Amino acid sequence: MEMKEEKRILVARSSLPPFEEYVEKIRPLWDSVWLTNMGENHEALSRELAEYLKVPYVSLFTNGHLALELCIQGLGLSGEVITTPFTFASTTQAIVRCGLTPVFADINPKDYTIDADRIEDLITEKTSAIIPVHVYGNICDVEKIDAIAKKHGLKVIYDAAHAFGVTYKGKGIGNFGDASMFSFHATKVFHTIEGGAITTGNEELVSLLYKTRDFGIRDEETVDSIGPNAKMNEFQAVMGRCNLLHLPEELKKREAVVERYRMHLSNVAGLAVSEPQEDVTPNFAYFPIVVDETVFGHTRDEIKDALEAHNIFARKYFYPLTNRMECYEGRFADADVPVAARTADRVLTLPMSASLEQEDVDRICSVILSLR
Ligand SMILES: *Cc1c(COP(=O)(O)O)cnc(C)c1O
């Protein structure tokens, strides 16, 4: 009997605006021939994003990672930075590439963000900042973290790469701490193909970032800070402006996917599904499950393999923990992070995008549930 190949489903799928819409908006670039260096679309996008994210300032960058590095540099951080290892490689790489030492705090088992009660024990006279991560779009305990930072004179930069558009008590999530970094990579909820931003209320930081993302150039004859090239170009900015227009409908589709997943998986013994957070407007960015194999009867890896056999590709976000990445040669491997370690060994992030149909979600869940 001939088997029909099952539809391939990847963990993420970039959303694209209608082709004609993008073309219409890039057409004027053939007249202006202003392709990068803070062009019209770049300036327009930063205003539109400031409004959407409900923040005072948005500085745009060619990607989120360089935004984070330049923010670390711009705030003058030194010595040790308290962070978590349950994140994408970028967070820890930025800290280390800026010559700082990451000090790893454990996460909480509820939403996988930094356990704010573990931060104070890790503060030493070398600590200059806290870099927590709003992982999966779940927000950290921003009130407690900002209070600890104030008490000890520390800076806070939130890695908000997953938290585009999330609000807490009606406030844009980019208003907390000294600054937040957002990623606009193609796989994120909102994207500019590659891209990123820093949001902050610190005007001085904004003018510094304006230069440092452009080689530190102040004017034609003055280069008074040290910086790489991290500018967002016009083609990226136009993609962002188009995607921003379609975001409300994309979010509705994502919400429907999350609801469908929850319907199938919320009450399954041995599977932990993340719950909505109080006072938070979510962005439905990811759908992680944490598998307790002693109850479910199968491991995370077995579920992942079973899905792959059906052409469905889930990912182990986040495994391995960043403190165990080979590049650090064991320097941070003995960090005391048992919850993060347990979660990294058991978590599986299921496919999540606005393009998933209800029947796709049904198919994914039935593969998982039929293992029992
Ligand atoms: C995507 C991501 C980044 C890096 O952003 P880029 O835009 O890809 O450079 C940083 N931190 C986290 C948690 C991310 O998911």
Image (cartoon, grey):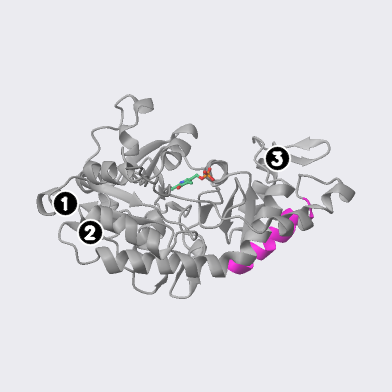
| Alpha carbons under labels 3 and 2: distance apart | 45 Å
Q: What's the amino acid at mark 1?
A: Asp
119 relative to 70 in the view: left or right: left
Crowd class of label 3 (few under 14; some 14 to 19; many from 20; radius 10 Å): many
> Which secondary structure lies at badge 3?
loop
- Mark 2–mark 1 CB contact (< 8 Å): yes
> Which secondary structure lies at badge 2?
strand
Q: What's the amino acid at mark 3?
A: Asp
- Between 272 and 158, the residue placed more toward the observer is 272
| Alpha carbons under labels 2 and 1: distance apart | 8 Å
- Which residue is depicted at the point 40% across and 65% down? 358
| Alpha carbons under labels 1 and 3: distance apart | 48 Å
- Mark 1–mark 3 CB contact (< 8 Å): no
The tally of labels here is 3
Q: Is residue 49 magenta?
A: yes
Q: Specify the segment rendered in magenta.
A: 39-54
Frontmost of labels 3 and 2 is 2
Q: Which picture quadrant has residue 276?
A: bottom left
| Residue 269 pos. (x, y %) | 15, 61
- Mark 3–mark 2 CB contact (< 8 Å): no
195 relative to 87 in the view: left or right: right
Circle 3 sits on which residue? 214
Q: Which picture quadrant has residue 140?
A: bottom left
Q: Quadrant of the C terminus?
A: bottom left
- Which residue is depicted at the point 36% across and 27% down? 328
Is 92 situated above or below 190? above
| Residue 101 pos. (x, y %) | 39, 35
Circle 2 sits on which residue? 272
Circle 1 sits on which residue? 292
Crowd class of label 2 (few under 14; some 14 to 19; many from 20; radius 10 Å): some
